Amino acid sequence: PQRHGFWELKPPVQEGQKDVDPAHWTLVNGGNAAGRMDDTLRQSLLARVNEVMAVDQASAKFKGMIHRADWEAIQSYTKRVPVPMELALVRARLENCYYRTLKAFIFDVQLIQSDYLLVSKEKGLRKAAKELGDTLLQGLPV
C-alpha cells in the first residue's frame, strides 16, 4: 500500500454525507499515484547523496552541510537561516519516499546551498557549497 500525506488526499463528495472515513478518501490528483517520484529515480538520487556523504566522511569537505549539529557552534545561525536544511535529512527523506517530485528534491539541495552561503564567509567553504549542488544536481533539470 502506498502512503500519502494528508495534504494529498480529499474526501469523496457524496451528497448528504457529513463524515467520511479517511480510509475512503482519494488522491487529490484523481486517484492515481501521479506525482510520486519514480523508484528508479529515487534510488539514483539516494546513491548520489550517499556518495557525497561518503566523500565527506573521508575528507570533511562538506562539513556543516551534512548534519545540522555542526552548525550549532555558529552563533545566531537560526536568526540568519530561516529554513535550516541538511543532507542527512534529504537522505532520510529519500529513504522514506518523502519526495513526490524531483522538483522537491532539487529545492532541498538548493536550500542547503543557500543556508551554507548565508553563514559562511570563507571562500573555500562557499566553493564547497557550490560543488555540493553541482554534484547532486548534475544532469537534472534544474
Image (cartoon, rainbow, N blue to C red):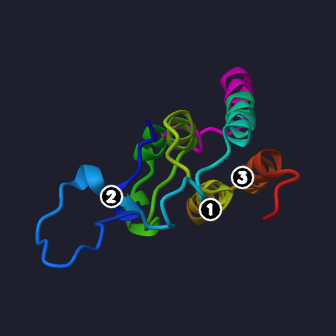
User: Residue at point 13% right, 78% down?
Assistant: 16
Amino acid type at circle 2 is: Phe
Q: Residue furthest top?
A: 58
Vertically, is 92 above or below 16? above
Amino acid type at circle 3 is: Ala
Secondary structure of the residue carrying tag 2 is helix
The residue nearer to you, when weighing 103 against 80, is 103
Decide which of tag 3 and tag 2 comes sooner along the chain.
2
Q: Position of residue 58 (x, y in %)?
A: 72, 20
Image quarter hosting the N terminus:
top left
Tell us which disc is closer to us: 3 or 2: 2
Q: Which residue is mark 3?
A: 129
Secondary structure of the residue carrying tag 3 is helix
Residue 100: quadrant of the picture: bottom right
Q: Which residue is mark 2?
A: 6
The residue nearer to you, when weighing 130 against 41, is 41
Q: Position of residue 116 (x, y in %)?
A: 60, 56
- What span is in magenta? 53-67
Secondary structure of the residue carrying tag 1 is helix
Say if mark 2 contacts mark 1, CB within 8 Å: no
